Amino acid sequence: MSRPSTGERAGGVSATASRVPSKRREQRLSAVPARRVPDEKAYLYEIIQTISAGPDLATVLRGIVRLVTEATKSHACFVYFVEGEHLTLRAASTMYAHLEGVVRFPIGEGLTGWVVKTRRSAFIRDKALEDPRMLYIPEMEEERFQSMVSVPVFSRAADVIGVINLHTEAPREFDRADLEFLEHTASLVAGAIENARLYENATMRVAMLTELSRLAHEIALAGSVSELLATVTAGCQAALDAETVEVYLLDPDNRLVLRAATPARVDAPVIDGRKFKGNPLAIDSRSSPAEQIRTLAEVVWGTETAGAPLFVPLVVGEDRPGLLAARTAATSPDALHLLSAVASHTAVALKHHELVGKLREDNLLKDFFEALSREDGGGEELSKLAVRLGIDLSTPHVVLHAAPWSGHPPVLRRSRKTRSAVGPRALSWTEIGAALESSLSGLLPGTVFDCRSTSCRAIVAVPANGERELHEVVRRVYNRVSIEGGLFTVGLSNSCREAACYPRAFGEAASAADVGALIKGSPGVYTYEDLGPYRYVLSAEDAIRDRHQEQLQRLVEYDARRGSELLHTLDVFLEGRGNIVGTARLLHSHPNTLRQRLGRIEQLCGFDLENEDWLSLSIAIKIVKLRLARSSARTEEGPRG
């Protein structure tokens, strides 16, 4: 017998019969007649009837305690169950019924523990407290008892699942008939215990499934992440009767941080996977070694914590966003199944909230970009959106515009070792946008993106070292994504310091991406300043039609027929301010050849280059070249459908 909380010492039976009693003691014992079971068959029949009455184990045990006490003429009867590494009092005579479930002690202590370990019946005939195997429990008034008998209860698998103890106040010699009756009773009790446990387990599983269904419903209805996690910890704590249930989630630094606990906790550690041996998210109580579980439990709750630690990672797809931790009285498969199911529901719900939050953020960003790009989009609405997104428009920002490249892929120079290697797979536009957003947001804090199906816009905060550093960072990211298989072009506006200049900046960034790539004939990163004089003709490309453009169109048609470059020759000549020698050097030709070409240009277009307005003619050339480049790009891209 025993009890855990009171430090009891449960009864142990020793072979006191080996001791030689004194003459006076023999006389005293002989005065107490041996008591036999008066009608063993009748009592066994009543015990069978009691066991057959129903699956309620508590009722069955009370009936058995009463019948055994009456049949053996004992003063008290106690029934202990083996529960893990402990023995627990599950049934007792009426005067000790209040100790049921309270008295608990480790297997191996007292006579009761001795019976479990040796798997043999035992008794103490006299002076029970003097036996070295006895474990004294004050609440059980063991000083009143002189004799004790203890019988093991075997399961169908021949495991000891319990012990029946009998106590008498006067010395008592239990004979073979007493022991046989008790052993028969123990055999019947074993069946009752196993059947009742099956019933209890089935009832418990039904209750757990009901609780899991209710909890899953509440998890799905949670309106926020904090409400979701509070529902999980409180629901698991109630369903498992756990001492504590906690949820840890990964933070941006890849550390596990406590986000919810029942009961509440303020001293939880931050679990850094870099300092923890191994990945804490890989530890799962369903499959991990006990040593790993114990190590993690010591990190989470300390070395002196009692109870069985349970850990189940939150898993959704290939992601493991966190860990569900619980501490229960004992480990059980049912508890792990419930915890695992709740962890799955929680992971899915967290992903749902993440996606919903992303959609809300995307909608907020779209509204912000739309308001920022409109001429009439400023004012109170824009200010509120900027505050919600954490953007300070009073600090300098640059508008970035990225779009897919529709021309021919650039030729990649490769070393001899990689010349025969297969090039990288072409990234989709979604992949390109995601790579740009993740890289630039990390390297240039304060960057916000609005990615669409055919383009990406971003507001990029100018770093402390100025726009040059910003341009360098963007070019590094561009080169990395391009090497991975991204075909796109990027344009950067001039910096903005107030909301009013952003509508113009959006146009500058889009023009830099579009026109820069057209002029250079290849994708890349282009600033608005890189456009040079083309900046001044963008708005006039379709709005202005003059004599010079019509005359230059003859050169375009001639070049198309003959494969010549007279339009380019005239452009370089005007850029060189009419210097024949300098222009010839730039064109890698002889000055006389250049003079012949200029004569052909005058003849075709009807120009008199000495008397023409060179500024107007130079602007007209830029407009014609830009129109020609855009037309060529549309032809190469082909029809969309």
Image (cartoon, rainbow, N blue to C red):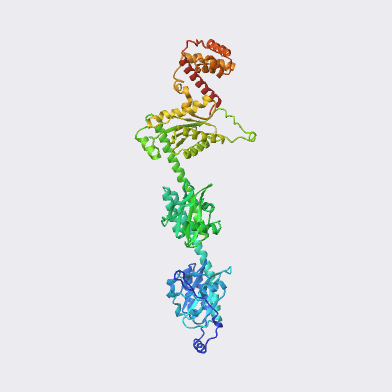
Q: Nearer the viewer, residue 150 or 274?
A: 274
Q: Is residue 594 visible?
A: yes
Q: Residue at x 50, y 26 (%)?
A: 516
Percent position (x, y) of residue 379?
35, 33
Q: Is residue 362 above or below residue 161?
A: above
Q: Nearer the viewer, residue 10 or 154?
A: 10
Q: Is residue 374 visible?
A: no
Percent position (x, y) of residue 234?
43, 55
Percent position (x, y) of residue 366?
43, 35
**Residue 290 falls in which quadrant of the image?**
bottom right
Q: Is residue 198 above or below residue 139?
A: above
Q: Nearer the viewer, residue 104 or 416?
A: 416
Q: Is residue 307 above or below residue 71?
A: above
How many circles with numbers are drawn on the protein?
0
Q: Nearer the viewer, residue 422 or 577?
A: 577
Percent position (x, y) of residue 135?
49, 75
Q: Residue furthest left?
A: 380
